[in-house]
Image: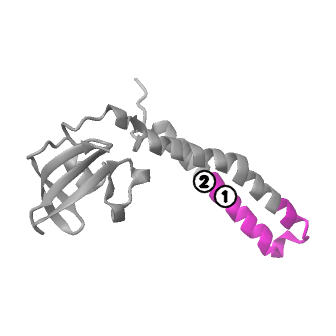
Amino acid sequence: MAETKPVGAVLTVADKHRLESELNMLKTVKRAEVTREISEARAHGDLSENAEYDEAKNEEARVQGRILQLEEMLANATIVDEGDTSAEQVSFGTVVTVFDMEYQEEDEYTIVGFTESDPSKLYISGESPIGAALMGARVGDIVEAETPGGIVRMEVRNIKRR
C-alpha cells in the first residue's frame, strides 16, 4: 500500500522563508539561551524549590514544541509561488476587490498563506472561509462564504497580482 503524505497547510514562498527563519533562530539561538538558563538555575542549588529552574525547563519544553510544530508544518506544507499567479482568477498572491451584497460596500482582500494572514489589513488566508470561497473565482462571479457571522455573498469585481 502506498504511503500518503499528510495534507498540510498551504504556504506562500514568503511564508515558508519566514517559518524557516523562525525555526533556524529557535534551533541556533533560543535553544542555546534556554540551555544556559537551565545551567544557571541548576547552580542555585535545590531543584525541588527552584522556580527559575522550573521556568527554564518550561521554556525548554515550549521551544522544543514549537520546533517540532514548525518542522512538521514545513515538511507537510504545500508551497505556492505567487510569481506563478495570474489575474484571471483568485489564487494565492492575488488582490481581489469584492462587492459585499449585504452591506453594499467594496472590500479589497489580499489572499495569502495562513502565517501571513492579518484580518485587520484584509490579508486573508486562502484557507479561511472567505478566502476559500474566493479561490478560483473570476471577475463577475458571485460567491458565498459561510462565516461565523453568517453567510456572506460577494461579487468579484477585480483581481490583480500583489
Pick the front one: 162 or 78: 162
In the rendering, at what x and y percent does residue 85 appear? 29, 35
**Element type where label 2 sits in the image:** helix
Residue highlighted by disc 1: 61
Instruction: Say above or below: 108 vs 136.
Output: below
Measuring 9% from the left and 47% from the top, which residue is drawn there? 141
76 inside magenta stretch = no
In the rendering, at what x and y percent does residue 111 appear? 31, 49
Real-space CA distance between mark 2 and mark 1, rounded to the nearest whole angstrom:
6 Å
- For mark 2, does the 10 Å Cα neighbourhood hold few (<14), some (14 to 19), or many (20 or more) residues? few
Q: Which mark is residue 97?
A: none
Quick one: quadrant of the N terminus? Answer: top left
Measuring 32% from the left and 55% from the top, which residue is drawn there? 124
Type of amino acid under label 1: Ala
Image quarter for residue 118? bottom left
Q: Which mark is residue 65?
A: 2
50 inside magenta stretch = yes
Measuring 19% from the left and 59% from the top, which residue is drawn there? 146
In the rendering, at what x and y percent does residue 89 appear? 19, 39
In the rendering, at what x and y percent does residue 81 appear? 38, 34
The stretch of residues the image draws in magenta is: 38-64
